[in-house]
Image (spheres, rainbow, N blue to C red):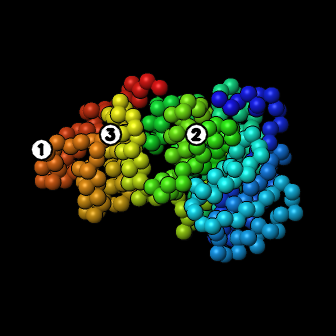
Amino acid sequence: MGTSASMSNSNPKVSIIVPAYNAEDYIGETIQSVLEQSYENWELLLVDDGSTDRTKEVIQKYLNDPRIKYFYKKNGGQGSARNLGIKKAGGEYLAFLDADDLWDVDKLKTQVKVLSEKKDIVLVFSRLRRIDHKGNYLNRDLGSGTGVYRGFRALFLLAAGTITIPNSSVIATREDVVRVGCYSEKDEVRNMEDYDLWFRMLMAGCRFYGIGETKGAYRIHEGQSTYSSPGASLKLIAHLENMCEEYPEKSRYFKYLIIRRLSSYFRLHGKTAEAGDTCIATYLSSSCIKTHWVERYFIRMIGLTRYLRLRGLLIRRFRRFKHFVASINS
């Protein structure tokens, strides 16, 4: 894995990739948080994904710094914008930052040190503060999971929501990101391109390290593209269905994850009748769960939520989450 170069270089160059679409309101603050980094060996690659506002004009104010580079492309989504940045990157490390998020002054310095010192670690992530559109702290952090993560066990924890990896907190070796094919540009993973990449890196043998410190801010505002929206559970379920076909020997784990995400979707939508119907339709059509006709009959009779409660799928079959995780051979 791509760690030998970093081990021999105490001051590796970091390529910071920022995709931007109609980001005029916040991108100036984002760039400023990079300029204030205590670690100075970086380049900032700003990829304008077809903005129609004043994003370009805001960025131009900073282009007198030779470390800052601007690229314009036709709108194609965050995956394609980030991939263009990776293609243009000259650093051995890649750091990802969304155009509305912020970094603490020692963010790069702290994480570069971890990557340089810890053997076999190719990706480091941290926690981020949640802030509103004005920068006010929302009394809750994003990101969880301190320690080393690898293999299918880490994928399972990530998909279950036990650990979370905010995209703007990540720094990784360029070699390993490129090795797994960079970000997906497929429509079916749009707005969850980061999690798709983490999944593929983990299954390719990459080791991640989470630091328990908060090293930046994740901005929540109207109109943002985010994986954390309630509907994202359905997109992740579809992704897990595809992975179940790819790794059939892990089907019981994917089945559990799908059921867990359906429960999350139902709860986040206020347990409405419409949300319940969506969950039932998704559950019954799942190629991973493969319901029996008798099961289908009872579900339609009494509803999915009540059925799961009666059958105890999430209580008896997977009574102890930690024991279930421990059964995974990574």
Residue at the image position 55 percent from the left and 30 percent from the top:
205
User: What amino acid type should be assigned to the residue bearing mark 2?
Assistant: Val
Q: Which residue is mark 1?
A: 294
> Which residue is label 2 attached to?
180
Residue under label 3: 255
Q: Residues within 10 Å of mark 2 (few under 14, many from 20)?
A: some
Depicted 329 relative to depicted 126: above or below: above
Residue 249 in picture, x, y percent from top left: 35, 30
**In the displayed structure, would residue 188 be above or below residue 2?**
below
Of tags 1 and 2, the one toward the viewer is: 2
Q: Of residues 229 and 191, which is closer to you in this image?
A: 191
**Does residue 169 show up?**
yes
Identify the residue at horizontal 76%, vertical 31% (top origin): 5
The amino acid on which the numbered mark 3 sits, given as a three-letter code, is: Lys
Q: For the residue carrying disc 3, how many other residues have a C-alpha within 10 Å: few (<14), some (14-19), or many (20+)? A: many
Q: Gap in Å between the C-alphas at discs 2 and 3? A: 25 Å
Residue 220 visible: no
First in sequence: mark 1 vs mark 3: 3
Residue 260 is situated, as x and y percent measured from the top left of the image, at 35, 44
